[in-house]
Each structure stands twice: as structure tokens, then as C-alpha cells.
Image (spheres, rainbow, N blue to C red):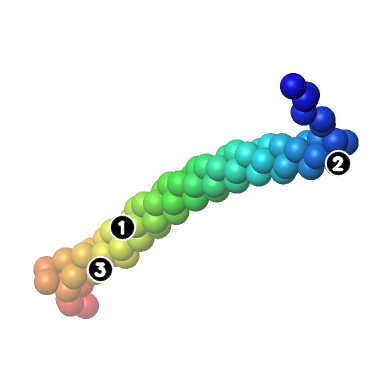
Amino acid sequence: MRTPQVRLRNLMILIAFAALLLTAAVQMVRLQRAALRAEMLAAEAQMGLARAEAALQQALAATSQQAQAPRAATAKKQVNPDPRASEP
């Protein structure tokens, strides 16, 4: 029986093909990690945006309460004028 001969060219093609497959596998893992990292960063950015919107709402509420307080005080003065103020 004849033993199969391994040519150097065939061996080099096999090694190149295996290297190509390993490169593709490594690249796929890197892409998955990058996608996960991007997803985590997007989630953190979304949380930061939600916090900023909540802080804005609180600031607007505090501002509107402060603006209404002087109006209420002047309204009370106009509704209940001091009778002594009109006398000379």
C-alpha cells in the first residue's frame, strides 16, 4: 500500500485556512464585546439623561413655587388693604 504524501503547498494552504478561521473567530468575539460595551455606555447615557431631566423638573418646580410666593403676598395686600394707610 502506498502512504499518502503531504505536499508542502497543501500544508501551507491548510495552515492559512486555519489561521483565517481563527482570525474570524477572534474578530467575532471582539465585535461582540464592543457591541456589549456600546450597549452599556448607551444605558449609562440614558440614565444620565433621565437624572438630568428629573433635576430640571425639580428646578422648574422650585422656580415656579418661588415665583408664586411673591404674587400671593401682593394679592393678599390688594384684597385686604390696610384702612390706616388711606388716612392722612
What secondary structure is marked by label 3? Answer: helix
| Amino acid type of the residue tagged 2 in the rendering | Arg
Q: Earlier in the sequence, mark 3 or mark 2?
A: 2
The nearer-to-camera label among 1 and 2 is 2
Mark 1 and mark 2 in contact? Answer it, CB < 8 Å: no
Which of 76 and 15 lies nearest the eye of the viewer? 15
Q: Is residue 16 left or right of residue 68?
A: right
**Residue appearing at x 31%, y 63% in the figure:** 64
Neighbours of disc 1 within 10 Å: few (<14), some (14-19), many (20+): few
- The x and y percentages for residue 24 are 66, 44
How far apart are the two marked residues, 1 and 2, measured between alpha carbons?
77 Å
Which of 42 and 85 lies nearest the eye of the viewer? 42
Q: Is residue 4 left or right of residue 59?
A: right
Look at mark 3 in the image and give the residue it sits on: 71
- Compared to residue 11, the image places residue 76 above or below, namely below
What secondary structure is marked by label 1? Answer: helix
